[in-house]
Image: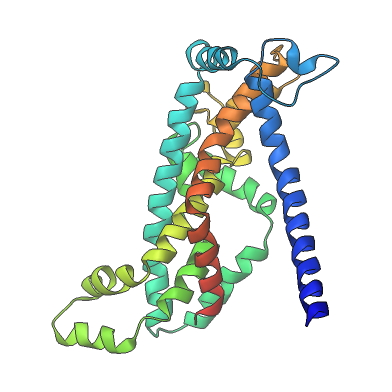
Amino acid sequence: MTAQFSRISVWTVLKWALALVVTAIALFPIWWMINVVFSLPGEPVSINPRLWPTSIPAGVEKIRLIFTETDYLHAYCISLLYALLTIAGVLLIGSLAAFEFALFEFPGRGLLFGVVMLSLMVPTAVTIIPTYLLTSQLGWLNTMRGLVVPGLASAFGLFMLVQFMRAVPKDMIEAARLDGASHVQIYWHVALPLCRNALVTLAILTFMQTWGNYMWPLIVGTKPAIYTVGQVVGLFNSPLSHQTVDMVMTANLLAAIPPLLFFLIFQRKIVEGIAMSGTKG
């Protein structure tokens, strides 16, 4: 009994030690950014760098300069609008498609769903050129439509929502029909409320992906008026920007705050939603 208790204790200690090491490795870059931002100019690149912030007022002043002396705040608004419109479109289109694929029979359903799933295996770089050419022909370059519309059809979102909607009892669908509910009413009042957790999870994941999207905004948005946060941070990181290290770190830290907050607040729902999407159906 004592030996068994000893083995369990050692294994528990090893697990905690490994978890702490992984946590430290993951958090150190973020802590280093905070340390560089909230310190006096010149300290981050000194011979003896410190591992803790030395000047909160200096960091606040750097953040103020970023927002007042550059177009960073405008890029923040563009990125938020881009993310919110993409989330709304992905949830609407994905839920409508999943409602049909999961709960109703129609010719070619399996083939169409298989084609959508195969698109998950196609690298994004393969579709960049045809998508850009189509966007250009539509006259959507340097517009919000050009940013948002190509990303509205999410194969991953469709897969996740289909797994949830397959668990909707068919008896509820039939009961709603007998009560005189239309097809749209069944979708809105029966299917969507039962898939609320999946919709929240998909919204969070879409926000994190959209906020960090750099390639497509860089290609389709070449004018400063449509720059996203990723593009502005790219300008700060450019070797020709002549920005100091602490200002570059400030721009990077401000860009990292929204996805970090979303993940910390909704991490349980993200894990639960992905886990449940793999077990349902």
Q: Left or right of 185: which side holds 115?
A: right
Residue 31, image x and y in percent? 67, 33
Q: Residue at x 33, y 87 (%)?
A: 170
Q: Observer-nearest residue: 122 or 99?
A: 99
Q: Observer-nearest residue: 28 or 195?
A: 28
User: From the viewer's perspective, is residue 68 above or below residue 151?
Assistant: above
**Residue 76 seen by the camera:** yes
Residue 86, image x and y in percent? 44, 48
Q: Left or right of 169: which side holds 45?
A: right
Q: Where the N terminus falls, by quadrant? A: bottom right
Q: Residue at x 45, y 69 (%)?
A: 161
Most distant residue in the left direction? 180
Q: Residue at x 54, y 79 (%)?
A: 279
Residue 269, image x and y in percent? 48, 60
Which quadrant of the structure image shows residue 257? top right
Q: Left or right of 65: which side holds 196?
A: left
Q: Observer-nearest residue: 179 or 222?
A: 179
